[in-house]
Every structure is written in C-alpha cells, then in structure tokens.
Image: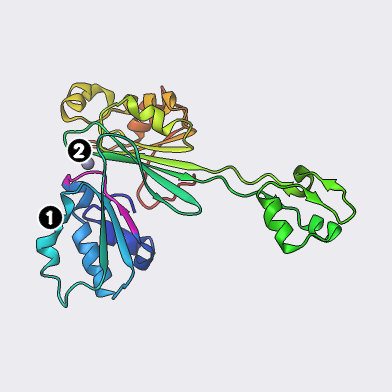
Amino acid sequence: MIDCGEGTQIQLRRNKIAFNKIKHIFISHLHGDHYYGLIGLISTLNLLGLKSDIHIYAPSEIKNLLQPQLDFIKGGMIVNLVFHPLNFKKPQQIYSDKRVEVISFPLKHSISTCGFLFRELPKQANIKKEMIGFYNIPIAGIKEIKNGADFVTPEGEVIPNEKLTNLPPKPVSYAFCTDTAFHEPIIEVIKDVDLLYHEATFLESMRDFAEKTLHSTTIDAAKMAKLANAKKLLIGHFSARYNDIKLFEKEARTVFANTEAVREGLTYKV
Ligand SMILES: [Zn+2]
Ligand SMILES: [Zn+2]
C-alpha cells in the first residue's frame, strides 16, 4: 500500500481488498492527507489478530507520532510493526524479493518527501514444453536452460538456448510521485517507466501558487512524463477547489498525450 489517508479503510472495503494482504506500507511524507489513516488501519489489523509483520517505510518521525496511540490499543499489540526510515538524500533500494524491487527517491516538497519506484525484476525464460519431451530433458537440465544454458544431448549434440525457450515477458515498472514540485533529478530514477503516477494539484493558471506550495501543475506532471519517457501518465491529488477533473486531463494532454486523470475505484494496468 502506498500512502494511507483518512478514507483508506472505507475504500478497502468498498473495493473488496482483503486487509490481511497488506504487509508493506509506503508513506511518502507526513502531511495528514498521506498518513492519517494509518493508526486506524493498524488498529483494525491488530483486531483481526494478524500475527505477521507489517513493514512501514516512512520518515523516521512516524514511529514517535504513532507510539502514543499504539500504547493505548485495546488488548495490546499483536501485530508486529517493522519501521524502515526513508532516505531523503538519495535514491535507495528499500525492498526486494524474487519478483520485484522498490526504490525510494527524494522529491521536492515543503517537508521531506519520497517517491517510490516499483520495478519487476527480469523474469526467467519460459522453456517450450514440447522441447522437454522431444529431447528428454531431465529436471536439472530444465533449470539450467531457464537460466540461459544450451542443452547437450547424450549424443553430444548442442541445442542452442533460443531453440528451447520463449522470451520471458518484459518486466514492468510503476512510479509514484506525490507530493512534489517539478523536480528534474527524478527523471533519471524513473527513466522509461511503464506507468507514472504524478501529482497535478493545480491547473497551469495557478502556477504561482503551485510553486509557492511546492506542488505541481498539469503541465509539470506532463513534462515529467515526457522527459522520463514514461509510457503512460496518471495524474491525481487534485485540489478540492476544482470540480471537473477533465480539465486536468485536457491540459496535461497538450504536452503528454497518454495522460489519464485518476478516478476513484478504478484499476489501472501497468
Ligand atoms: Zn504534502
Ligand atoms: Zn498531499
């Protein structure tokens, strides 16, 4: 989960997302709209009796902010919280498993803020099933072929790897950048990302105010997508003063055509 605003639990229920699937929570910064839902969510997970660890990647101060409320949780804490402080000086890998890695990187906002890049790791090649039978390939051989090896038959014939495998699906990536002003150092980190979520709090007509509050306009977000060579841009975090999010889409598309304004409850494919 990335950021945890006040309405998080309502949205999880509305969208039928199982609470017990949440094991890693990434908090971009400590403005209320990004973490005021966290203590409520932790309390619910605790009530559900979840015994697994919950990892929280956030500014280091979050522990002290939550602790006084955690001390009063009814029945004591069952859930084990593991805090991982974010680095606001440079990009850093903060999570990895066999399938994916997560990199945090500093943004430009009125308080310390990080964006997050979720990147699938290269996948193994798929071995063609019919080849296993045809060449009688043993299990040990399958593993080696998946890692790129050729196969040598008992007669000494070398079967090249390309003949035995299909190319693996291309790994995909997703970057989350909010809250932030236009910030060039981000480009290098998120270069060629498949899906970029970038805040666009204001329309371009409010550029001065956007700069003052260290937020972005639609054009900032679209420029970022263009310079980073993103495949698709999602914009959000719209100021409550606007009623029509189509205006955001329209303006951003003048710079980056493949832009969509996020709508609540929709799923977006990477
Ligand atoms: Zn903020
Ligand atoms: Zn915000």
Q: Which residue is the site of mark 2?
A: 112
Q: CA distance from mark 1 to mark 2?
A: 16 Å
* Residue 257 drawn at (x, y percent): 46, 27
Dot 2: few (<14), some (14–19), or many (≥20) neighbours within 10 Å?
A: some
| Ligand 1 within 8 Å of the CB at mark 1 | no
Q: Which residue is the site of mark 1?
A: 64
Residue shown at 83% from the left, 61% from the top: 136
Q: In this rendering, does residue 237 appear at all?
A: no
**Ligand 2 quarter of the rendering:** top left
Asked which quadrant contains residue 239, the reply is top left
Is residue 80 magenta-colored?
no
Q: Secondary structure at mark 2?
A: loop
Relative horizontal placement of residue 235, taking residue 229 as reference (left or right): left
Magenta region: 24-31
Q: How is the image coloured?
A: rainbow
Check disc 1 and give the amino acid type: Asn
